[in-house]
Image (cartoon, rainbow, N blue to C red):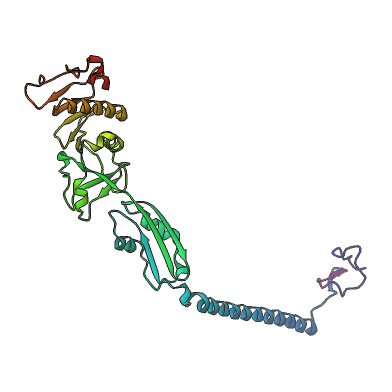
Amino acid sequence: MFARNTHRPPSAKKGNYQFRHRVTATVSGHIIELNPETDATRSERRRNQARTGFKWAVALITLMLVGSLAKLVVKEAFLNNERFELKQLTVHTEGLLSREEIVAATGLHEGMNMLMISLRSVHDKVESLPQVKSVKVSRNYPGQLTVEVEQRQAVAWLECPQKSLPAKARGLGCLLDAEGHVLPNFNESDSREQLPIITVEDPERLVPGQSVQSTQALAALRLLRAHQESPINHSLELLRIDATKKYALQAIYNSKTIVTFSNYDMDRQLRRLERVVQEATQRHRSLATVNLLVEQNVPVTFREAGSFPATASVTPKGPLNSRQSLAAAR
């Protein structure tokens, strides 16, 4: 007579109290509702909804109270705690940049909360300065922040007459470190007036903090570095390197001696130059020019008239024979 309830599993117990589905049956074309909605069922549903709403309200209020309490604890225990205030900012550095310039780059000041300071951000800000080579930032409690900065040390001035780039011009000149990075000349310093000058024809684009885009300038820096490590640095002071030619470098010394180098194998050429200087010193000759581009012997000129021809191969007459002479410098 009644339609079979297909929603009931076979293992379910008898009775409709476990199922609140709307059950209907069709009798002679009429639909009969077997589980009608009454006032009691509607009241029960409203009570269930009220209970659920109350539970959600209690949970929300509890979360708000816990959040407010946690915020208050964090504020009093960390943010407003004097133990976490920045009281001393120490900068260890040596070079063109002063301590005040580095502190200004960090953007830090005393009284800041150390927990809110990003060490990575401080590191990146200081490292972005053209004069900075490397940075180390450390945080020590209570209230100490240490910034260790290794600066790029200027080794030479860069000069380009065609681009109106003078050397040793305070505030306008351009400096280079040993790796060829461009250093702006902001501050006045008498110690940098003694640095040698590298003259180039076209340095292309000069960007502070980046390497100079000139192969001849980089070759001149290699020569300068090799010269400083060579024993000849004690007897000859290098004042200027002319790097305007692509095939050679011309070094000018304090004795007004001009030495022509190739762009490669600086150490071997400096050993040959050392031998030439030793032989010239023994014979009391003043060198005017030395050409190290020539592989066989070493062409030189002297300042003293009458001692040797204007251009002489390094096989001078004297106590040493030709094999023991300056030709041995090759």
The residue that appears at 15% across and 27% down in the rendered structure is: 289
Q: Is residue 24 magenta?
A: yes
For the point 17% across and 47% down, which residue is it? Answer: 168
Residue at 10% across, 19% down: 309
Total labels: the figure holds 0
Tell me if 148 is positioned left or right of 49 in this view. left
Q: Position of residue 79 (x, y in %)?
A: 48, 75
Residue 184 location (% of width, % of height): 25, 50
Residue 14 is at least partly visible in this image: yes
Q: Is residue 55 above or below residue 14?
A: below
State whether residue 316 is above or below residue 71: above
**Whole-percent x, y for residue 215 in the image:** 28, 34
Farthest-out residue, front: 319
Q: Is residue 330 visible?
A: no
Question: Residue 22's image quarter?
Answer: bottom right
Position of 136 compared to 105: left or right? right
* Point 31% across, 30% down: residue: 267
Looking at this view, is 287 or 258 the one in front? 287
Q: Which residues are magenta?
A: 19-27
Q: Quadrant of residue 249?
A: top left
Residue 254, given in percent of the width and then of the height, sits at: 16, 37
Which quadrant is the C terminus positioned in?
Answer: top left
Above or below, 63 against 29 in this view is below
Camera-side residue of 66 and 92 = 92
Residue furthest left as drawn: 305
Q: The N terminus is located in which quarter?
A: bottom right
Q: Quadrant of residue 298?
A: top left
Membership of 256 in magenta stretch? no
Of residues 170 and 75, the one drawn nearer to the viewer in this rendering: 170
